[in-house]
Amino acid sequence: MDQFRISVSKDGNLFAEAHFITYGGARAEPLHGHNYRVGAELAGPLDEHHLVFDFVRLKRELEAVAARLDHRVLLAARNPDLPLERTDGGEVVVRSGSSRYVFPERDVVVLDVPNTTAEMIAGWIADRLLERLGEAASPLTRLEVEVEETTGQSAIVRRSLSG
C-alpha cells in the first residue's frame, strides 16, 4: 500500500531568537541566539484532489507559528532553575544563578516547556501547528517538525495522529 507525505522547509520558515538552557544543578549556558529554520512534514491518505495536504496552507501556517517566536527572547515556564517573575511595569525578570535578566514583556515569549532546547521548541511548534490546522488535520496520520539550530544540527519531533 502506498504511503504519502509532504514536506516544507523553505527560507521563509525562519525565526531568530535568544535563549539559554539549563543542564541541571542550576548550571545554565549564557544568553545567546540562533537563526532557526523550521520545517514540517505531514503524512496521510490522499484526499479527493490527490493531495495529502495543501503545500501553500502548510507553508503559511508554519510561517505564522514561526513568526510568533521571531526576534523574541524565549523563556521556559516550567524550568525551576530559571524562575520567572512578571513585574507591574511590564517586564519579565529571570534569574540564573547570580545573574538577573530583565526584558520588556513585549520582547518575551514564555513557552510552556521545561527548557528552551531545540527539542522542546520543535514540540511547541508542532502543538501550535496542529492548533492552526484544526479539523483539516483529522485525516492525517503523522506530523513531523524539524528545528534546525545551525547547518547540520537540528531537533525533530514526530507526532502520530489519529488519521
Image (cartoon, rainbow, N blue to C red):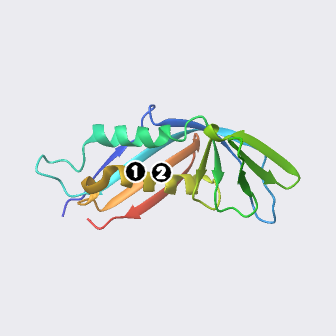
Q: In which quarter of the image is the N terminus?
A: bottom left
For image coordinates 76% across by 61% down, the residue present is 81
x and y percent of residue 62 in the render? Answer: 40, 42
Secondary structure state at the residue bearing disc 2: helix
For image coordinates 59% across by 59% down, the residue present is 113
Q: Which mark is residue 19?
A: none
Q: Quadrant of residue 131?
A: bottom left
- The Cα–Cα distance between marks 2 and 1, rounded to whole angstroms, is 6 Å
x and y percent of residue 13 in the render? Answer: 45, 36
Q: Which residue lies furthest to the front in this view?
A: 88
In-image side of 46 versus 37 (left or right): left
Instruction: Give yes or no for contact between labels 2 and 1 (Cβ–Cβ under 8 Å).
Output: yes
For image coordinates 68% across by 41% down, the residue present is 90
Secondary structure state at the residue bearing disc 1: helix
Q: Quadrant of residue 105?
A: top right
In-image side of 123 versus 133 (left or right): right
In-image side of 78 versus 140 (left or right): right
Q: Which residue lies furthest to the left in this view?
A: 48
x and y percent of residue 50 in the render? Answer: 14, 48
x and y percent of residue 103 in the render? Answer: 72, 40
According to the picture, the residue beneath numbered tag 2 turns out to be 125
What kind of residue is marked 1?
A: Leu
For image coordinates 42% across by 35% down, the residue present is 10
Given residues 123 and 156, the one toward you in this image is: 123
Q: Residue 129 carries which label?
A: 1
Q: Quadrant of the C terminus?
A: bottom left
Given residues 133 and 50, the one toward you in this image is: 133
Given residues 20 and 106, the one toward you in this image is: 106
In-image side of 42 versus 91 (left or right): left
Circle 1 residues within 10 Å: few <14, some 14–19, many ≥20: many
Q: Which residue lies furthest to the right in this view?
A: 98
